[in-house]
Image: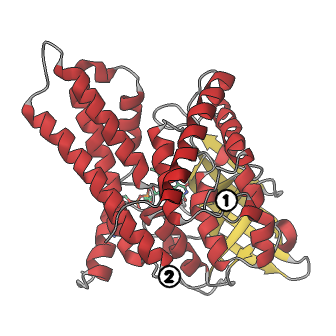
Amino acid sequence: MDLTWSDGEEAFRADARAWLAEHLATWREQVGGPLSGDTREGFAQHLVWERMLFDHRWAVVSWPDEYGGRGASLWQWLLFEEEYYRAGGPPRVTQNGIFLLAPSIFEFGNQAQRDGILPRMAAGDDLWCQGWSEPDAGSDLAAITSRAVRDDERGGWVLNGQKTWTTRGAFCTHLFGLFRTDPGSERHRGLSYLLVPLDTPGVTVRGFGRLDGDEGFAEVFFDDAFLADVAVPGGVVLGEVGKGWSVAMATTSSERGLTLRSPGRFTATADRLIDLYRSRTESPDPPPAAVRDRVIDGWMKAEAYSLQTLQTVTATVDGRPAGAASSLVKLWWSELDVELHETALDLLGDEAELDGPWTRGWQFSLSGPIYAGTNEIQRNIAAERLLGLPRK
Ligand SMILES: Cc1cc2nc3c(=O)[nH]c(=O)nc-3n(C[C@H](O)[C@H](O)[C@H](O)COP(=O)(O)OP(=O)(O)OC[C@H]3O[C@@H](n4cnc5c(N)ncnc54)[C@H](O)[C@@H]3O)c2cc1C
């Protein structure tokens, strides 16, 4: 196996590195902060950054040119991600669109959906949030009760129900969600994957604060909201009516396995952890050897994730989707993120109690084992679907 990058790939990396160094500095100067992207003001600042990325065709590098990308390979996308996090690029506030919904639109969407939805998503003109969880359906997603009833006369669907934990929902313009379209159906049958503009009459979005005070979540209510078939280009149903579960499972596979949390994010954190460790070795109270071992362990695990992802990309390029194996990937990155940040806090000692990037990063890392499907559920999937163990 040859793990070296080609000259073309190295040139692509160098371009990305140079562009990021210059433009991240410009953006920071322009917005003068920036604030957290989970606040209204911070979100607007991050959109300025998204538009800079888009204008220079760095927003969605692996998408075709006509949708705002540069037709880069998945390998080049990995290199871009590495450079992005190494340069200290901010969280992508467009992530639920570009990393979760978009792969499913490429796979299941019709041509009009691709042409009409993807360029606006890449430009940050339409901002998508994920409407799956409900007050009584989180881990057990097939228990959702939000429903869509067909209205042929008016040409659309009447939506009722409630979604919750909708990341950045209060700042978004559109929602992709699962709704029960066959009233007699149960569990994962009879669901459809709908694309809903949030300004549809009858839809109410109510943002709410997290423990850290940021308004990063929303509840979305549907009260006889009429969703016209033509509300989005190509129609509001992604995939077939009643077959939403399989589209949703493809989305979760992207979310857990490749696109949402690429290795670059963790290798950059591991490198920063090493810098932090080095900065502490000169102090009068240097860290004990056991902490050094944890720093090295974290770095090795981030490298291991990087190497493992090369396998995932090879399989994806060969047309072999990750499927249930993406649950193992999700377990790895979410637990690694907690470990890296906990080690940093131990190195910081009392300083960890002050608000700073490591402390904020640690707080967010604690949600990793919950979002994208809890780690308990990922272990169940691995046990049942990969190891073939009995369900009880
Ligand atoms: C930061 C963050 C962002 C999120 N963003 C979104 C979003 O944008 N859109 C969206 O739709 N949702 C989002 N969610 C919601 C997330 O998908 C749910 O929180 C998650 O699926 C768990 O559901 P729940 O909170 O209802 O917990 P529950 O399902 O009630 O689970 C509670 C506990 O019981 C455990 N448990 C449940 N069932 C089993 C079982 N069968 N076996 C073993 N243990 C079990 C769980 O692992 C968990 O520890 C987000 C969550 C977080 C933390």
Q: Nearer the viewer, mark 2 or mark 1?
A: 1
Residue 328 sits above or below residue 197 on the image: below
Residue drawn at x 73%, y 62% is: 65
Foreground: 312 or 234?
Answer: 312
Mark 2 residue element: loop
Mark 2 or 1 closer to N-term? 1
Amino acid carrying label 2: it is: Gly
* Snapshot quadrant of residue 159: bottom right
Q: Which element is circle 1 on? A: loop
- The residue closer to the viewer here, 125 or 230, is 125
Residue extending furthest front? 7
Residue where numbered disc 2 is placed: 319
Query: Dot 2: within a 10 Å radius of its alpha carbon, few (fewer than 14), some, or many (20 or more) residues?
Result: few
Judging by the rendered image, the residue that carries numbered circle 1 is 70
Image coordinates of residue 261 in percent, x first then y, are 45, 54
Q: Where is the N terminus found, in terms of image quarters?
A: bottom left
Asked whether the beta carbons under mark 2 and mark 1 sit within 8 Å of each other, the answer is: no
